[in-house]
Structures are given as structure tokens and as C-alpha cells.
Amino acid sequence: MATTVGRNIAAPLLFLNLVMYLIVLGFSSWCINRYINGQTNHPSFGGNGATPFFLTFSILAAVIGITSKLAGANHIRFWRNDSLAAAGASAIVAWAVTALAMGLACKQINIGGWRGWRLRIIEAFIIILTFTQLLYLMLIHAGALSSKYGPGYRDHDYATGQGHEHHVPGTAGEHKAGVGTTMAV
């Protein structure tokens, strides 16, 4: 089936992004817990002035990314243009918040100072996730360019219930003789 080209590429990327978002959520939660408790002297933590903002946006990006992958899994399962709307919208929001977190990661790296291995892992994963999430976003929207890659926005016969092989131009939405259009009072 030709429409599985995008599906076969997007499914493993969805799983990879889900695992990476789960790792970011775990490490970010640990780090922000240490930060709130005032334990920033822990050898695997450290940080600088950008750390609290970076951790906040990392947790936000991870939670939105994980929920976006749930909608994405539904879209991969059904692979229709109506499931594309939910998957695409949530993927765009997840990518936008991840891109914000990447900006803060770059700022944190630029400021310098001692950053423990957990913070460096979160920084690296957020930067990688920004690009893999963008690639995933482009893959699920590839159907807009060609139906070979997946469902797009050109499926006009979906609302009328007619298949591609039975569609007669000019018949969608026309009034049929003998069918009443008003209710009896």
C-alpha cells in the first residue's frame, strides 16, 4: 500500500521521541526537586542562572511531548486525515515548547559554570528532540505534498461517504427527488 511510506518512517520516530521525552521528564523532575529543596551543591546537579527556567520549560516540553505522542500513536494506528488534525496540532505545540526549551538550553550552555551530568543530558536530549520532533512533524504532514506519503488535506470524498472509484463529480450535496427536507409539525 503506497500510503504506508510515511507511516513506516513516522512510527519508529514517534517511539524514539516518546522514550526521549520520558527520559527528559525523569531527569528534569529529579533536578527541579533538588533545586526546590536547595540541594544545588549535589555533584551531579550544579547549574547557573538559567537553570530554573530551563528545567521548567524542559518539564513542560516533556509533558506536552508525551501527550502529543499519544495523539500521534492514534494517528499512526488509523492513518486518516481526521486523526491527522489532532496529531498535527499537538505535535506543533510540542515542537514549539521544545524549541523554547532548546533556546534556554543554549543559553545555559553559553553562560557556563559547573553543570552536572544530569543537566548536560537534559540539554543534549532537548536539543536532539527539537530536531527529531520537527522531522516527525514534517513526516506526518507529508501527505499534504503527495498522497503517497500519507493522508493529506485533499480527501474531498470523505464527507460524502463516497469512495474514490464510485465518486461522480457534481453529485455531492445535491438534493435527491422524493426526499423531504422539512419536518412535519
Image (cartoon, rainbow, N blue to C red):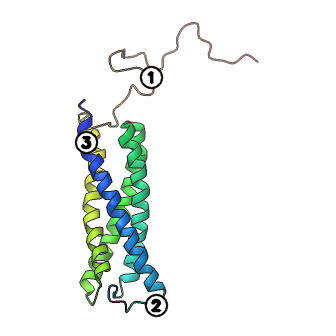
Q: Which residue is mark 2?
A: 38
The answer to whether 2 is drawn above or below residue 166 in the figure is below
Q: Nearer the viewer, mark 2 or mark 1?
A: 2
Q: Residue 3 versus residue 88: which sits nearer the camera?
A: 3
Coordinates of residue 20 in the picture (x, y in percent): 32, 63
Say which residue label 1 marks.
161
Mark 3 — residue? 8
Q: CA distance from mark 2 to mark 1?
A: 61 Å
Quarter assignment of residue 128 = bottom left
Q: CA distance from mark 1 to mark 3?
A: 27 Å
Labelled pair 1, 3 in contact (Cβ < 8 Å): no
Along the line of sight, which residue is nearer the eye, 71 or 174? 71
**Relative to 5, is 109 above or below?**
below
Name the residue: 37% across, 89% down: 42
Rendered residue at 36%/82% (across/down): 51
Tag 1 or tag 2, which sits nearer the N-term?
Answer: 2
Image location of residue 178, percent across then percent down: 58, 7
